[in-house]
Amino acid sequence: MRKWLLILITVVMLPMVAFSQEKSDEQHKEDMWREIESWKVAFFTHELRITSEEAVLFWPLYNDMTWQIQKLHWEKRKLRKSLFNNGDKPTEEQCKEVLKKILELDKKRDELKYTSYKKMSEVIPASKLLRLEDVEEHFRQKLFDYLRKRSQKNPPEMPSMH
């Protein structure tokens, strides 16, 4: 009787334990994302020497632009996956159609970037805006280095801004 009770309790509790672990992993990802985002703001602000007055106007524009660009990137990725993930070899016509859609998304990205840079040029000096892409690349490199090192036994702290 005790054996059956133990089995019943295990069967009932196992999904709850698994769900709580999954939630904990999801919470960890969200915490990590927030940490990276705050580091990004600090890094960009320092590297571009953005004042607090500029930051109030710059960050909403920049965040909107990067979010919209990310959505376009996800659309392109989805298109490619849909073409090659079904196991069948796509026809040339299907490939042409997907390529056309991808090029249209790239055009939207370029137009979005153009209008966003125009808006941002009204809130921060052009000298700072011209450095934005270099700072983005520098940040990505530091982040990749950090994430690569993080997989080691003793992960490092978030890197410094310099």
Image (cartoon, helix red, strand yellow):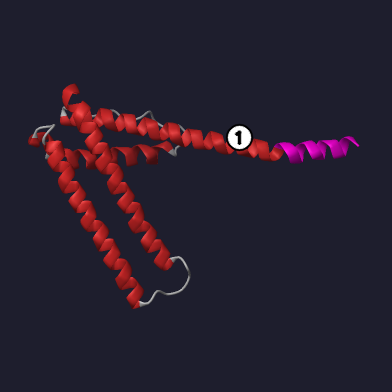
Give x and y (percent) for residue 24.
Answer: 54, 33
Q: Is residue 99 magenta?
A: no
Towards the viewer: 108 or 73: 108
Name the kind of residue labelled 1 in the image: Ser
The percent position of residue 83, horizontal first and vertical second, equals: 40, 67
State which region is magenta: 1-13
Is residue 8 in the magenta section?
yes
**Of 73 and 61, the residue lying toward us:** 61
Picture coordinates of residue 153 (x, y %)?
A: 47, 35
Q: Is residue 54 left or right of residue 27?
A: left
- Quadrant of residue 140 in the image? top left
Residue 131: in sight, yes or no? Answer: no
- The quarter in which the C terminus is drawn is top left
Name which residue lies at 59% across and 36% down: 21
Q: Nearer the viewer, residue 11 or 159?
A: 11
Nearest to the observer: residue 160 or residue 37: 37
Mark 1, other Cα within 10 Å: few <14 / some 14–19 / many ≥20: few
Label 1 residue SS: helix
For image coordinates 88% across by 35% down, the residue present is 2
Main SS class of the magenta portion in the image? helix
| Image side of residue 26 versus residue 115, left or right | right
Question: Which residue is tagged 1?
Answer: 20
